[in-house]
Image (cartoon, coloured by chain):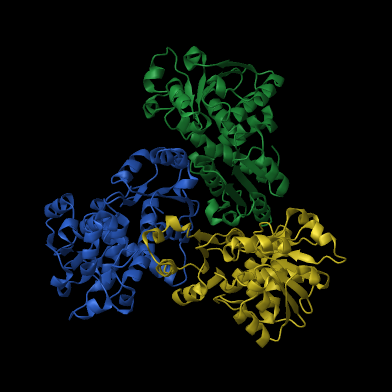
Chain colours: A green, B blue, C yellow
Amino acid sequence: MYVGADVISALQFTRSDVEKLIALAEEIRRVYETGGRLDVAKGKVLFTAFFEPSTRTRLSFQFAMIKLGGAVVDLGPEEVTSMAKGESPEDTLRTVDSYNPDIIVVRHREPGFAAKAAEICRAPVINAGDGYNEHPTQALLDVYTMWRIFKRLDGLVAGLMGDLKYGRTISSLSYTLSNFRDIKLYFISPRELRPREEVLKILDQRRVHYELVERPEEVVEKLDVLYVTRLQKERMSPEEYERLKGSYTVTYDYLARFKKIPVVLHPLPRVWELSRDVDVLPQAQYFEQAKNGLYVRMALIKTILGV
Amino acid sequence: MYVGADVISALQFTRSDVEKLIALAEEIRRVYETGGRLDVAKGKVLFTAFFEPSTRTRLSFQFAMIKLGGAVVDLGPEEVTSMAKGESPEDTLRTVDSYNPDIIVVRHREPGFAAKAAEICRAPVINAGDGYNEHPTQALLDVYTMWRIFKRLDGLVAGLMGDLKYGRTISSLSYTLSNFRDIKLYFISPRELRPREEVLKILDQRRVHYELVERPEEVVEKLDVLYVTRLQKERMSPEEYERLKGSYTVTYDYLARFKKIPVVLHPLPRVWELSRDVDVLPQAQYFEQAKNGLYVRMALIKTILGV
Amino acid sequence: MYVGADVISALQFTRSDVEKLIALAEEIRRVYETGGRLDVAKGKVLFTAFFEPSTRTRLSFQFAMIKLGGAVVDLGPEEVTSMAKGESPEDTLRTVDSYNPDIIVVRHREPGFAAKAAEICRAPVINAGDGYNEHPTQALLDVYTMWRIFKRLDGLVAGLMGDLKYGRTISSLSYTLSNFRDIKLYFISPRELRPREEVLKILDQRRVHYELVERPEEVVEKLDVLYVTRLQKERMSPEEYERLKGSYTVTYDYLARFKKIPVVLHPLPRVWELSRDVDVLPQAQYFEQAKNGLYVRMALIKTILGV
């Protein structure tokens, strides 16, 4: 990661990038948790353009920028913009870019949209999710969370569960972990929702060890981390959805039957696939994970701004 | 009110709390009206989460924080958040709380929601309205307005009119006034919209003198303050609504027939129950009342931040 | 333009106003493009109230204020405000005005709304579009753009094309140009969409030379500037709309047939009337035009704040 960099794909991240961002996130965290402040972004503006709903990503970027002393301008919901009059998102971004924001954070339902935005915009563009494709800053906070818990990333065994085909956090997380040694990934999903071929091909090229399994109970006890994601209703027939729900729901009772319970992560929002009774377990680290998003995004903003 | 306090119910306010906040609001007002500034909230972030529409409460909190030198992050309308994907408001708040806002202001249609939010969140939570239950900061600006006009709160005679059953400003205002001596309240409403039993019971315990009346003309001339609120259409049958409209509408002509016209307050927004021709009367103090919301919320923020 | 001025109509602008704002915009641009900053608006608040969608106007005002060191509060979309409960926009503005914003920027579908807002509000009001009536700050950036390209405004020949009847940029731009010598305007539109009588009458009084023409090819080669606007579907029958589309569409091929291609401007958003293949032409200056909005609005804010 360098000053002015676009962050489009987790494939950009090297091992060194990840390690530096984690170290910087830890340093920033230390400052803020002891009541300090870094006012390094004073006079800078971060622009957030979310063409799809978001809570964590949008708000943690806004908090991150403001806590660094910078300012935020938000595009607002589509109906208050000229897209309500038929403007293309490309024209919208090109215009806003001309107002000289220092960073543009963009989410859009179209895979490849962030790359297109980066071509259009002079400002550095951060991909906050482009359809089913990628969500690289989510991967950063995911591995930051693992690092905080295990004090290492090498050698981790992670089960990624749910809709692996259309879940953009899955590809980005796998790519980011592929920089580390002896990673073992279990992709836990119904056959129809296995990771896309293009993703598996990249993991093959990067010599990542992975297995495709269909039921979580086959592997839970081998895992350091169980990374749960939503099954997306709109991807399946209603019958299939109902049939699958049971097998991909993580509850307290479900976890309690195992001898070893892995750390449970989830990019959130959760719906039924991760029940609230899990929250009491010490292994439930998904709110801590969300919190880590703040610090890793502060680290990323600071790095890109070069301040 | 102390540093870091949650503000959930007007029952928390003591006489001394109210007096201190009024004194502080006056002091802040003096500074700002003479062109001064207090930059006491620099580096602090106020988070506003309005799960129901709001103009005055949301914007006056935002103006208050910004004028104190702090920053604001807003959740945005529900459709841009992950609640559009089915996330619970509890998960949403728990996440945002982990980004370390210094204060969270929350409105939600569910009575008791603010109390729940305060349990979930580390940050101080201010209740900006929880369904029909309470709206304590509205009560603060209401009594601040009365104090500015009458230079006292002891001995005031107030008529509270409209939908007293579901109006959250009614309970909070009554509770706040109950700290003062010789208060007399007239609850003016159709029988079906009288204050809820739980509210009257608390007023009984606090030995507040009140009367339930059905028609404003019975008491207008006895009042120092007539506090008008909306009749909420959705609470009644259409026939009943139409039948009641006439009796609970305050117009210039209606007021002009009385020998003594009380100060007219309204939490706003108004619809038909308070006609615009009243605005010209010197007794029409509802826009001044709205303005007072800015200063009393600045005072509250300053107190809670401990700055 | 003076400190504290309302900006309601382009008819307010004198030649000297326009020249001073252009000079100030150039000066501010120089500072920011060389990495400098003016923190002149510190402690000031700009309030944006857009009762109709907007991208450029809303965001460029927000960027302008923030880049000058000030803060922004936004009303938000209608459904999050008390207008969802039936409040009038007049009550909304009167309330917000009592929170002492330093400038209010307002857009509303009703012609004359900004003038009404200026009567209600103590704060200076800037008209960001009032229905089909006017959009004076758009006119400022339009003439600033022309000035940057031609280094003069006197003697310009401009073709204004599209829906001239209901396009609010047309009236404001014509009025602003009327301050300069030897301006020639061609109004290019179907007969039904010619400028309103009231607009032409004002131009007559101001002795502006103009012609009404129906097809762009009659005049393109005479123009310094072709100012394209949207044909608004909702103003016509579907048959008429389809019939007219062809004659008022500017494409690369359409322009390429002329010996001389004028500078092409557009207030944006564009839909089909200006095709994306035009973007490659050096005459395509509409994104530069949008960018100029930032600097001219910074100049206007600075002037009105008197800082």
Dividing the picture into quadrants, the one containing residue C214 is bottom right
Q: Position of residue C270 (x, y in %)?
A: 67, 58
In the image: residue B268, left or right of residue B34: left
Q: Is residue B29 visible?
A: yes
In the image shown, does B123 or C234 lie closer to the viewer?
C234
Q: Nearer the viewer, residue A109 or A174?
A: A109
Residue B161 left/right relative to C44: left
Side of C173 relative to C260 (left or right): left
Where in the figure is residue A72, as x and y percent of width and height? Answer: 56, 52
Identity of the residue drawn at 63% across and 84% down: C201
Count of residue discs: 0
* Residue B77 location (% of width, % of height): 46, 50
On screen, residue B280 above or below C233 = below
Q: Residue at x 38, y 64 (%)?
A: C87
Inspect this view and state whether residue A6 appears.
Answer: no
Position of the C terminus of chain C by quadrant: bottom right
Residue at the (68%, 62%) spot, across then down? C243
Residue furthest right as drawn: C259
Q: Give the percent coordinates (x, y) of residue C157.
A: 78, 75
Query: What residue is rendered at 45% in x and 58% in y?
Result: C78
Q: Is residue A165 above or below residue B141?
A: above
Q: Is residue B36 left or right of residue C274?
A: left
Instruction: Return the residue found at the far front.
Output: C239
Task: From this view, report whether residue A10 is shown above or below residue A36.
Answer: above
- The image quadrant that residue C190 belongs to is bottom right
Foreground of the two, B236 or C238: C238
Q: In which quadrant will I find the N terminus of chain C? A: bottom right
